[in-house]
Amino acid sequence: MHARWGSPLRELVAPMISEDAYPRFVEGLMELLSSTPPSACAGAAEFLQSARSRGLPVVIVTSNESALAGRDLQTLGLAGLVDAVFGSDVTAFHKPDPRVFDEAAALLSSKWGVDIGDCIYVGDSLTDHASAQGLCAFGAVTSGATTRTQFLEADVPDHWVHDSLHSLSQNLYR
């Protein structure tokens, strides 16, 4: 599972669940997750509020389903700090293919006049890093399965690797 981390949810569970059963699986997962509240990464609210206070758009591109990501943001009280969520169910391409950002890039350009090359993609996996290569800056947060050493070995510059969103936020917005 670790080797496939960052893949779309549908691909992660494909070896265990038939395509026909997938919608029921997602419904069941949402029901299960509603009884198990999510927890935000350290500094998530501060990071998003800092972006919002600077008038920066916040767009999430996730390998999760859009509804699951949206539910988590709502539960955590963070939904109002995010402008859009693009889950693997709505993107034509998936990580690590950089075209996973196509829909987000189009929205950023059309709505805010922001070029994807001027953005920072924050992720917690080597798959996230591979997705951003040559497209935009990448901020690594070691809150997931990938360690600082692994990010550094993958040539993520040291100043872009942080142990929390709080730390990344402090370095970005000083």
Image (tube, helix red, strand yellow):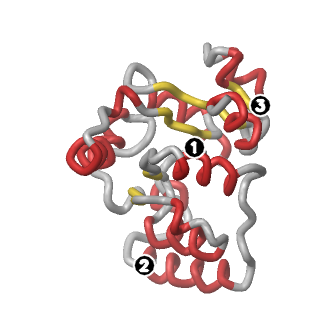
Q: Quadrant of residue 88?
A: bottom left
Residue 164 location (% of width, % of height): 76, 41
Q: Residue at x 59, y 39 (%)?
A: 123
Q: Does label 3 or label 1 sit earlier along the sequence?
A: 1
Give the SS element for disc 3: loop
Q: Does label 2 or label 1 sit earlier along the sequence?
A: 1
Q: Quadrant of residue 118?
A: top left
Relative to 18, does residue 157 appear above or below in the rendering?
above
Q: For label 1, count other residues whose C-alpha is less than 10 Å away and answer few (under 14), some (14-19) or many (20+).
A: few
Q: Which residue is under mark 1?
A: 4
Q: Does label 2 or label 3 sit earlier along the sequence?
A: 2
Are circles 2 and 3 on residues that touch, CB within 8 Å? no
Q: For label 3, count other residues whose C-alpha is less than 10 Å away and answer few (under 14), some (14-19) or many (20+).
A: some
Distance from disc 3 to disc 1, alpha carbons, whole Å, reads: 16 Å
Are circles 3 and 1 on residues that touch, CB within 8 Å? no
Q: Which residue is under mark 2?
A: 23
| Viewer-nearest of discs 3 and 1 | 3
Distance from disc 2 to disc 1, alpha carbons, whole Å, reads: 21 Å
Residue 147's tag is 3
Of the pair 67 and 173, the residue shown nearer to us: 173
The amino acid sitting under disc 3 is: Thr
